[in-house]
Image (tube, grey):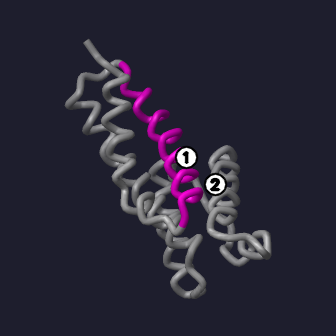
């Protein structure tokens, strides 16, 4: 019998150990990223409802790898101040998001996004803003 709850627990456990989440600059940012990661992971785990464990793990592997990479890149981007390094993180975010949301996913120019961020915002505010942007871009398909 397929136990989706167990599969979800294993997947969430793997996410909780992600260094991007555990090394986030502040606790609130880490909590926000973990919550977001769990939402995305749950979507993919639910797609495996009719699969045995081995095929499910094979199916989930690229998505969970992309999710961990995207969270690491978002954490890096949100806390980075050097524009050249931020561009590298931005590229990684977009590449990972293409795996998660489909090849048609595209981020707007980073400069446009930076200009829309709250001027007094910290890392958490940057992460929340980026989450909204990514979700909106994903909805566009």
Tell me the chief SS of the magenta region: helix
Left/right of residue 85 with respect to residue 65 in the rendered view: right
Q: Which mark is residue 13?
A: none
Q: How many marks?
A: 2
**Quadrant housing the N terminus:** top left
| The one of 114 and 34 positioned closer to us in this rendering | 34
Q: Measuring 52% from the left and 69% from the top, which residue is drawn there?
A: 25
Could you give the CA–CA distance between mark 1 and mark 2, rounded to whole angstroms? 8 Å
Q: Measuring 58% from the left and 51% from the top, which residue is drawn there?
A: 32
Left/right of residue 111 with respect to residue 82 in the rendered view: right
Left/right of residue 102 with respect to residue 115 in the rendered view: left
Image: magenta residue range:
26-49
Q: Is residue 34 magenta?
A: yes
Q: Which residue is mark 2?
A: 131
Q: Is residue 48 magenta?
A: yes
Q: Measuring 39% from the left and 40% from the top, which residue is drawn there?
A: 12
Check the image and report above or below for 35 versus 56: below
Mark 1 residue crowding within 10 angstroms, few (<14) / some (14–19) / many (20+): some
Check the image and report above or below for 22 versus 48: below
Check the image and report above or below for 37 versus 92: above
Mark 2 and mark 1 in contact (Cβ < 8 Å)?
A: yes
Mark 2 residue crowding within 10 angstroms, few (<14) / some (14–19) / many (20+): some
Query: Residue 48, percent across and down?
Result: 36, 27
Q: Which residue is mark 1?
A: 36
């Amino acid at each position: 019998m397929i136990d989706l709850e167990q599969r979800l627990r294993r997947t969430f456990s793997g996410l909780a150990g992600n260094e991007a989440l555990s090394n986030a600059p502040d606790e609130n940012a880490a909590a926000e990223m973990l919550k977001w990661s769990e939402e995305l992971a749950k979507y993919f785990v639910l797609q495996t409802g009719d699969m045995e464990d081995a095929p499910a793990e094979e199916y989930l592997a690229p998505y969970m790898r992309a999710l961990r990479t995207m969270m690491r890149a978002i954490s890096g981007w949100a806390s980075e101040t050097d524009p050249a390094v931020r561009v590298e993180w931005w590229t990684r975010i977009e590449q990972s998001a293409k795996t998660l949301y489909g090849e048609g996913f595209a981020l707007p120019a980073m400069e446009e996004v930076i200009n829309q961020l709250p001027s007094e915002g910290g890392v958490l505010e940057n992460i929340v803003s980026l989450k909204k942007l990514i979700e909106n871009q994903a909805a566009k398909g």
